[in-house]
Amino acid sequence: MSSSKPPSGPQAEIDPNSPLLPADEMVLPTLHGDGRRRWLNPALAQGKYWQRRRILAYALIAFFVTLPHLRIGGKPVVLLDIASRQFTFLGHTFYPTDTPLVALLMLTVFFSIMFVTAVGGRLWCGWGCPQTVYLEFLFRPIDRIFSGTAGKGGKPKAGVHAALQVGRFVVYLVCCLFLAHTFLSYFVGTDRLAQWMQLSPFEHPQAFAVMAVVTVAMMYNFLFFREQLCMVACPYGRFQSVMLDRKSLIVTYDIHRGEPRHKGKSLDPKAGDCIDCGHCTAVCPTGIDIRNGLQMECIHCTQCIDACDDVMRRIKKPEGLIRYSSQDALDGKSHSWLRARTLIYPILILATSSLFVYVLTTKFAFDVRVLRTPGNPFTVNPDRMLQNNFQIRISNRTSGPQNYQVIMKQPAGATATWSDGTPTLKPEESKLFPLMITIPVSSIAGRGTLDGWAEIQDDVGNVREIHLKIQGPK
Ligand code: SF4
Ligand code: SF4
């Protein structure tokens, strides 16, 4: 991947009064040479890729907004309940005890991203990422309505009227409020959110504060930060250089066909097809020139393809001077989808996803976790019985209420008793229950610790074995 070229054109603009030293080379395409922000107002190329992206974008917006409302078996399809450390995905709830399952799921997602990127480049960035989808298909259309020529990518002839600026701000605010509520519903669920929306903010100040912070963050992002998020904040853009190879699908300029570029018509038979019209850079939402080669800032949005195809049609040349291709294909080398990484990633995806499904389908009907009660590790009662206290976290994974019995299996002579009576849990409920283990002091004498094993059984006969480290005098 080539790095960005030295500044030229608007990137080289330097304020003579700036107290800062100008940079020797371009740091970001969105910065002037003296460090000032170079505000981008990309024009719109309404070619075939834009038409397809627009259909997908509106389908995705509908999907993002609808997803938290969908249910499977009465449970949300997606609910990331951070407060109670429970994640529901496709109707299945993961608890803190499900770390291996969550790890397998994350690995499957991670390998899938690596695979998609190795094959299709930054398809996600250009076509599916919420940042691109909302910025390009919700907020930029608002700019085109309210910001005059600047919103349409042209040079502003006059300042935008204050009423229009206020109008734009208000429409942005309404959109961001809506998006912030949608975002919040992924974490608290639509039912709770609907309840809160009917109450005063003073009755749920934390949730209201989160919503307000998310709204402000969205306003900042879509009004000011914009393409900078892809360039300086998103880790995926940084990682792509290790995920792409010379056979990955990328948006690229055909240097062999386009160069030497020339302005306007040329009678030179050696002249390339690029007429240096600048349309590809005028539409670029990250402010780069695709003709400088593959750059980290390119989100593969295909706007430059649409712009250049339009130019090619007008000058009666074949389309595709900028197109989807690979670096090897451009260099005339054979192109094959089959290579080490496109074989290894699917194998890894199959392995982690199969393991995930296996663990998920063979999981117990309830989870148990043993914690030692804080304080004195043991007490010796007047009847010479040693007592150890534990806290047992039980998570009921069934859809019915359950009672849990405990039976001490080892060592001989030990007994296990629920201190607060038999635990009962509602469906999907998870709670801590105190458990008391007693054993004659003589059983542990001289050893200090003893391994104990107990079984916990629910109403329908599911059994979990737990290990208890019994402590006593040496
Ligand atoms: S739009 Fe096409 S012809 Fe115009 S400058 Fe870009 S690559 Fe060259
Ligand atoms: S170079 Fe082309 S594909 Fe890349 S971000 Fe700019 S317009 Fe989009």
Image (tube, helix red, strand yellow):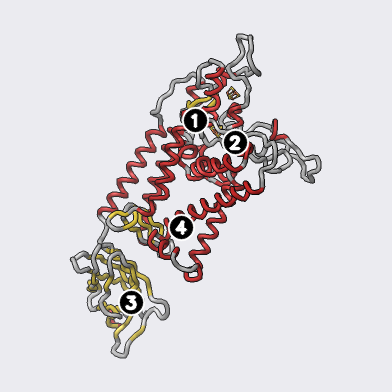
**Separation of residues labelled 4 and 1 (CA atoms):** 35 Å
Q: Give yes or no for contact between labels 2 and 3 (Cβ–Cβ under 8 Å).
A: no
Mark earlier in primary sequence (3, 4): 4
Camera-side mark, 1 or 2: 2
Q: Position of residue 140 (x, y in %)?
A: 55, 41
Numbered mark located on residue 250 in the image: 1
Camera-side mark, 1 or 3: 1
Q: What kind of residue is marked 3? A: Pro
Mark earlier in primary sequence (2, 3): 2
436 or 173: nearer the viewer? 173
**Separation of residues labelled 1 and 2 (CA atoms):** 27 Å
- The residue to which callout 3 is attached is 434
Q: What kind of residue is marked 4? A: Leu
Find numbered disc 1 in the image and state the secondary structure of the residue it sits on.
strand
Numbered mark located on residue 152 in the image: 2
Mark 4: few/some/many CA within 10 Å (<14, 14-19, 20+): many
